[in-house]
Image: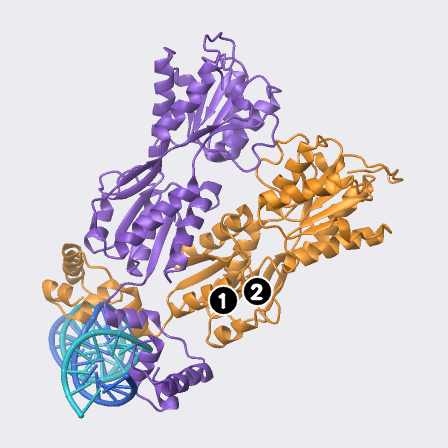
Chain colours: A purple, B orange, C blue, D cyan
Amino acid sequence: MRDVAALADVSIKTVSRVINKEKYISETISRRVNEAIQRLNYRHNLAASQLRAGVNSSAVGVILVDISNPFSAAVHRAVEDVFRETGIAVFLASTDEEADREKAAVHAFSKRRVDGFVIMPASHDQGYLLSEIAAGTHVVIIDRPPAYLNVDFVVSENRKGARLGVDHLIRHGHRRIGFIGDWPTVASSQLRLAGYEDALAAAEIERDPRIILQGFADAAAVQQATENLLAADAGITALFVAQNALCAPAMRAVFARGKRKEIAIVGFDGFDGADLIEPGLTVIAQDPTLIGRTAGELLLRRMNGENPEPTGQMLDTHLIVRGSGEIPGPFRVKDASLA
Amino acid sequence: MRDVAALADVSIKTVSRVINKEKYISETISRRVNEAIQRLNYRHNLAASQLRAGVNSSAVGVILVDISNPFSAAVHRAVEDVFRETGIAVFLASTDEEADREKAAVHAFSKRRVDGFVIMPASHDQGYLLSEIAAGTHVVIIDRPPAYLNVDFVVSENRKGARLGVDHLIRHGHRRIGFIGDWPTVASSQLRLAGYEDALAAAEIERDPRIILQGFADAAAVQQATENLLAADAGITALFVAQNALCAPAMRAVFARGKRKEIAIVGFDGFDGADLIEPGLTVIAQDPTLIGRTAGELLLRRMNGENPEPTGQMLDTHLIVRGSGEIPGPFRVKDASLA
DNA sequence: GTAGGAGGCACATCCTTATAA
DNA sequence: CTTATAAGGATGTGCCTCCTA
């Protein structure tokens, strides 16, 4: 900046004025300064600028479980879109459900003075964020309800959604419905299991822990576990698959046993192309783009100085009927109005 | 930091020493300082530290076409994994194939003094990066060969891969093979089209521009265009779909016409669950994780001071046979060894 | 309306001092 | 008189705030 000032033969302060497009600079000087900037290949140092101005980095940190999961990716994309036009940059980190990595990412971004966080928590307790919040950093929690923290959050109706899906299977004559879910420590997974149990209770079906499978290291483990469940002759006629990434491997297991048209399946948030399968995968659909956009807007609002009471948004899910969830089960159902 | 020093009753410099874990600090003082840090909820300001030290931000910028595309997401995840342990943070931006947004993202990250970029270029000419490189910022280009820029790059064998896929269709008796591709301005798309043409030329099949479809606004447009192509009675018996996101909509069009078992399809890099479809989608597979990891490692190497000649890595693709590409065409083939 | 200058943001570098072996 | 350990102080990093003309 000093060099630019020297070349343009003005003071440093004037260069600063030109860069920040302040008022009261003549056209002539502005042009001269800009030419010097070009010639010297000068680049404004935002960090120094913000240090002096006493403001934060105009950046936000997004912390997700795994950006390579399409749900996370869609959420991120929506958050990014909210911030693009504002000149706010977005940091990204994945945690793989490890609370320590979540904390490490928060710390790394905090050192870089981000203005806010959008977090899909892997941690069981987000109380550690209180000090960040006290320091003026804003936080929005997504996908899973926050624990020990009163901040804005945006989640899907996990429990209601799961209940909806399992109800659907029950209405189609199923009573032995396997549950395939994420790690039981994951808050959203707990809620989906609760929704599953709600549906069973409402239909007076006994909950059988042997057909509730949770927590898998990878897709192969999901497939293996599903195969074992089907092979166990536990009388399973339907599966409720409580997370998107589990759907494909679970279906592989079903198909591998030749039960494509016998075992009914409902997934919580399937995958692109799930409609092409025969039968198409019936799912409880979420709206990751809306989650991301809402979270981004809530965060941006606070970054702009608004400070309302924290709000928790529960976004509706809905059933998409494609065939796999409508395979009839062995039990007669009185209700003729099957979806 | 001043407050911490005051509370711990040491000099600012000593606090700095503790934070940076320099040698020659006594246990006692170190503990006292750390307590003060805790008590004051102090957070080290990386920006100020790096300003004074004259180093960059220990952050990198990743610029992709669209993070919500699974290919991009997998690449990003691999890049992130390379940098996680090094304490280097990752910025992310999507361009939606708009060169201006690519430049805006580069500029935004450059102002934040990133040490390097990983870029999946939307631009037709990356010459604008020369000034960044001159300023000491490192660049690795991925997915598409760089234009007007001599830097490290990591791409798939787009042309060879496409040729492989179309050869496969030809060997199964097809000669009227529709091409469904990305915008023709996209470098990788051009190469895939070239590969398609290579295969046609080798088999002495005339290239018909009417069955080469490129550039779609969204999935619905792809599906509509494919339906029109099939309805046009152009004699199409096979499709080569040159990009992952185009596969599902193209298949929807084929299935909607009831040609599931008649029109052969090979995709360039399909999607998760493509094996569950009947018939499974035969694809030319890339390795996005390897692309991302390689790019991250190349960048990290330069950030660590190594400065070898730029290398261009062309990663092999391979054919995954699943059924859709093996639907026989109307032409007899002598080669008995069909894959 | 237009420009410049002193000073400081939060930190690290370089130099210096002090004690002990 | 070196060498290792432990701590402090002046100065400067790029830029903006506040004051001045």
What SS does tag 2 mark? loop
* Residue wearing tag 1: B103
Q: Which x, y percent locates residue C10?
A: 22, 68
- Whether B230 is drawn above or below A240: the answer is below
Q: Which residue type does callout 2 highlight?
A: Ser
Comparing B52 with B223, the one in front is B223
Above or below A230: residue B81: below
Q: For mark 2, what is the residue? A: B123
The chain to which mark 2 is attached is B
Residue A31 image point, x, y percent: 41, 84
The disc, 1 or 2, on the residue closer to the chain's N-terminal end is 1
Quadrant hosting residue C14: bottom left
Asked if residue A300 is positioned above or below residue A160 in the image, the reply reads below
* Residue A74 vertical placement versus A55 (above, below): above
Give the chain letter at badge 1. B
At horizontal 66% and vertical 58% (from top left) the residue drawn is B184
